[in-house]
Image (spheres, rainbow, N blue to C red):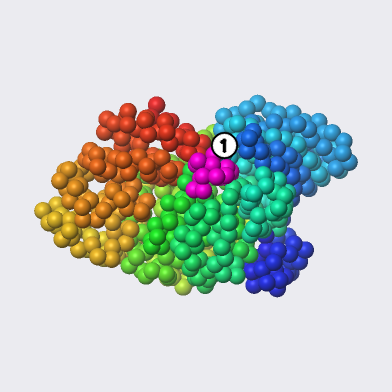
Amino acid sequence: MKKSILATCLCMGLFTFGCQSNKEKENTDKDNSAPIENKDSHSKSNALEINPQHVSLNLEVDFDKKQIAGSAKWLLKPNENTDKAVFDTYQLEIDSILYADGNKAEFKIGSHDPILGAALEVELKKDTEELTIYYKTSDDATALLWLTPEQTFGKEAPYLFTQGEPIYTRTWIPSPDGPGYRFTYDATIKVPEGLLALMSAENPQEKSKNGVYEFKMEQKIPAYLMALAVGDIAFKTVDDRTGVYAEPAILDKAYNELDGLGEMVHTTENLYGEYKWDRFDVLFLPSGFPMGGMENPRLTFATPTILAGDKSLLNLIAHELAHSWSGNLVTGASWDDIWLNEGFTVYIERRVTEAEHGADYAAMLWDLAEKKVDAAIETAGENSKDTWLKLDLKNRDPENAFTRIAYDKGAALLLLIEQTVGRENMDNFLVKYFKDHAFESMDTERFLTYLDENLLNDNEEWKEAIRVEDWVYGPAKPSNYPKVKNTRFEQVSTQVDAFKNGTSAADLKTEKWSTYEWLFFFEELPSKLTLEQMEDLDKAYKLTQTGNSEIANAWFLHSIKAEYETAYPQMKEFLYVTGRAKFLSPLYSEMIKTGKSEMAKEIYKIARPNYHPIVQRGIDGILK
């Protein structure tokens, strides 16, 4: 991908692959292996020896077989005396592998590991720099969710999307599948006529006549950021470098929610430097998408659950946009370093949110985040190493990295640094950090050295106030956990007290409450409300019928606890059409906890096909 829509070579927004400015080449020609010294424990590949440079995909998407088939041609720069190339795979069917001269290469597939999959070992000749792997995906391709027309908004065409993070790209592309291994790619993708294909690359904005699409990603990215979506998808422009993709049935709704997308990009640039990925488009997926969003470069995947109609949930888009700097531009070298992706991104998200909505609004998010950290520590155990920022996930599923520790404890450390050194110093440091390490990978130890040399080195008071190693290599919440004054929640607390003391719901002072004030209100209420209280709240605020997914989720949790059966039909519909794990796990868990296992299983039987395999595994475990 190219850097900026403002670059003259983009020719007024038209896709031009051949031109690249000197400044762009400075960012893309770096040695992508240089920052990485240690092998990724979640990759069986020998990427540090073969130095992958580029992959060319030529694939066909077959909805009838639920299979992707074709080839991946890898361009390598093997170290001297490297006699084999090893790629990560997971249940891929390898048909054959060819050298550049067309001769077949000898290969073998190692033993299957339930987490890591199997190593694909290919014999290298003396001067081998190109290997073309012909393969097919299997039914166990975790990255792929195949949806029937009935599971889409339009109800007329099937849909496919991928989810590569953390190590699922190996289920649809044989690759060095680790966050520290970066390369460029291009692709030719054939799909059924009438459908649009999109990737984390330069994208079309309308359907082709023959179902064949060409893609190019000119900047090096790790495998987990390779993404594909295929469906009845349309596009609407927001400005010269942003736009919205969605099924036609929800395109206008999506556009209306994101018509300020371009301004959000400008806001983030003003804080942390130039946006280097050319375009920032958002694709709203069908409801089976398991996450809030996925920061695929150039094309963020987003859940439709943020389409509340009032722009109240767009901090999620701010989060995915922030990844364009932290995570995509500078990437954690392994999943042990995930806080360098997610903690930085949450911090940037909060700063963008503050710039757009004010400090008092952002303060609510900081407050709620600390509660999530407390809950994560309680779950893991106060002395657990899983509450460190630097994780140790060797021989464990990297999915274990995705807790509020990496996100919110990581962000809190950056907030503490900001409060200690001053905002101007912090912003200057981050701008320099992203510039110095653009399109590189970063591990925790190198970052701490960089932090010391570029910000803290000459000020012992700052070092003592922050005590960074207590955060990175220490459990739970350090004693210097930062605080943010939150007056809006203080006002909500007075209304909670009033409701507890008998004030009717209709008489509470809730005018102009944001989503986050409502979430705090529900958190502060008694764990189990009476039916009379539930009816009073529902009558006053129509909570059972809310179109805000965050509020709906909080309300349905209270409904389960209180056995407020009036809300059950709407809750079931919510569970049938919502695939977001953040909402599903708490609701199913609460049904089991409160003796409603039969209801949970009945709902799940209908809803399960709409859930991503990642989510299915989680709910299967809850209901076992």
Q: Residue furthest left?
A: 502
Answer whether residue 455 is visible to the viewer in this image. no
Task: Identify which residue, 28 or 311, lies in the foreground.
Answer: 311
Assess whether residue 160 is covered by the magenta stretch.
Answer: yes
From the top left corner, tell me how far across and down residue 427 is, in percent: 49, 69
Task: Identify which residue, 94 or 338, lies in the foreground.
Answer: 94
Q: Quadrant of the C terminus?
A: top left
Secondary element at image label 1: loop
**From the viewer's perspective, is 402 left or right of 174?**
left
Task: Identify which residue, 411 or 459, lies in the foreground.
Answer: 411
| For residue 13, above or below residue 565 | below
Answer whether residue 144 is visible to the viewer in this image. yes
* Residue at image coords 58%, 56%: 234
Numbered marks: total: 1
**Magenta residues (range):** 148-165
| For residue 231, above or below residue 119 | below
From the top left corner, tell me how far across and down residue 430 is, in percent: 52, 65
Tell me the amino acid under the disc marked 1.
Answer: Thr
From the top left corner, tell me how far across and down residue 181 is, in percent: 66, 48
**From the viewer's perspective, is 434 left or right of 87?**
left
Circle 1 residue: 142
Assess whether residue 50 is covered by the magenta stretch.
Answer: no
* Residue at image coords 68%, 63%: 2
Q: Residue furthest front?
A: 156
Most frequent secondary structure within the magenta stretch:
loop
* Residue at image coords 17%, 43%: 531
Q: Quadrant of residue 8?
A: bottom right
From the top left corner, tell me how far across and down residue 143 is, in percent: 58, 40
Q: Quadrant of the N terminus?
A: bottom right
Task: Identify which residue, 285 or 157, lies in the foreground.
Answer: 157
